[in-house]
Image (cartoon, rainbow, N blue to C red):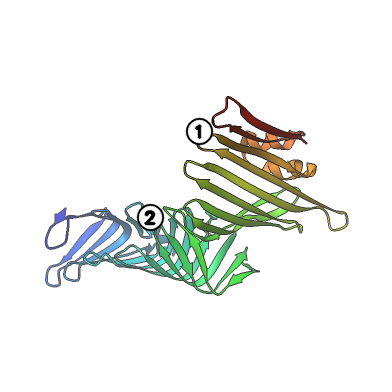
Amino acid sequence: MARKDDIETTVNYHARDSMFFDLTNQRMTMYGETHIDYGFIKLEAEKTEVDWIKRTIKADFVKDSIGLSRGKPVFTDGGDIYETTGIVYDFKSRKAKISGVITEQDGAIMHGANVKKNEDNEMFITGALYTTCTLANPHFFIQSKNIKVIPGNKVITGPFQLKFREVPTPLAGPFGMFPQPKKKASGILMPVYGEERLRGFFLRNGGYYFAINDYLDLRVTGDIYSKGGYGFQVNNTYFKRYGYRGAFNYSYIKNVTGTLVNTAEQDSYWIRWNHAPQNQGNSRFSASVSMGSTSYNANNNLVIQGEQGLQRSITSTFTSNVSYSNKLQGLPYNLSSNARLNQ
């Protein structure tokens, strides 16, 4: 069935069970696997009410005979999907009020008690959790009373605290900003949760990303382990058009393994630097440096997925190379030098 009036496009709707029309008040109520399709908007729920005068849709779930929830509303706006416990959507203003929402935005998952969504697709969430854990009850999350989501740009929070399995951690602040950029933007980087046999449960790669400009950035991240280990990484990439491109990385880790009775501690570090010219000028400088503690490779590179991490772990020799060459103008000679280090 379809209806057209001063709404911008056709509203298509159907229901598995039944539809009831109130012609006096111009309202319609649908039951049983209801579906509404309005342009880029789709809404599925067990019960849906449409008010043609106010131009609103209200969707809810119902409870069956044993008290279980059935048909919770699922709201789709373009490529964004919102799992909810209830929603009111305005056709004309494109605003929405959502309760009990779970949605994924650019790789991050947000839970909210109540959400207001404006015509610019921005969300204002109260009672919010922000995480990258895909479980319904996430292992770790940043909790804040208020979060603002600007799609394709960033997430801004009020006072926040990182919690691990509902246990508060010292990581907290008066506000937070998490990048969700279509282009580079500074902001907080969410950690990755997991478990290792030797070092225990961990949060890795949490920190801050500095988008200094189009040609220079800096990423500072840290790791913590339940057995007491910790580490940090500094990553910098740089670029000059028609000049050079490079990346620098410094990693430090304090490994703590064993048991409370028999604990082993070990410090290790690693430095990587790659620099390559991007032109064919008279002078060229390049570098490929990889050096650090021998123990670093065995202890830390298995966290890198696939064959690359395995190869680093079993490799006992690393080579660094720095070279410079210069074509002397007006002379049929080239000047070059090369330094090589095997570790």
Q: Quadrant of residue 124?
A: bottom left
Name the residue type under label 1. Answer: Gln
Q: What is the x, y in percent for residue 313?
A: 72, 37
How far is the residue under mark 2 from the one under mark 1?
A: 49 Å
| Quadrant showing the C terminus | top right
From the top left corner, tell me how far across and down residue 283 is, in percent: 57, 36
Label pair 2/1, CB-CB below 8 angstroms = no
Does residue 34 appear in the picture of this structure? no
Identify which residue is drawn at 50% across, 62% down.
178
Q: Which mark is residue 126?
A: none
Q: Is residue 286 above or below residue 147?
A: above
Answer few, some or many: residues within 10 Å of disc 1's Cα (few below 14, many 20 plus, some between 14 and 19): few
Residue 275 picture location, percent across and down = 60, 41
Where is mark 2, residue-wise?
Answer: 81
In the image, 199 versus 33, the foreground residue is 199
- Is residue 88 or residue 13 the one in the foreground? 88
Q: Residue under circle 1? A: 280
Say whether residue 278 is visible. Answer: yes
Residue sitting nearer the eye, 116 or 120: 120
Disc with the residue nearer the chain's start (2 vs 1): 2
Q: Residue at x 68, y 40 (%)?
A: 289
Q: Amino acid at mark 2?
A: Ile
Callout 2: helix, strand or loop? strand
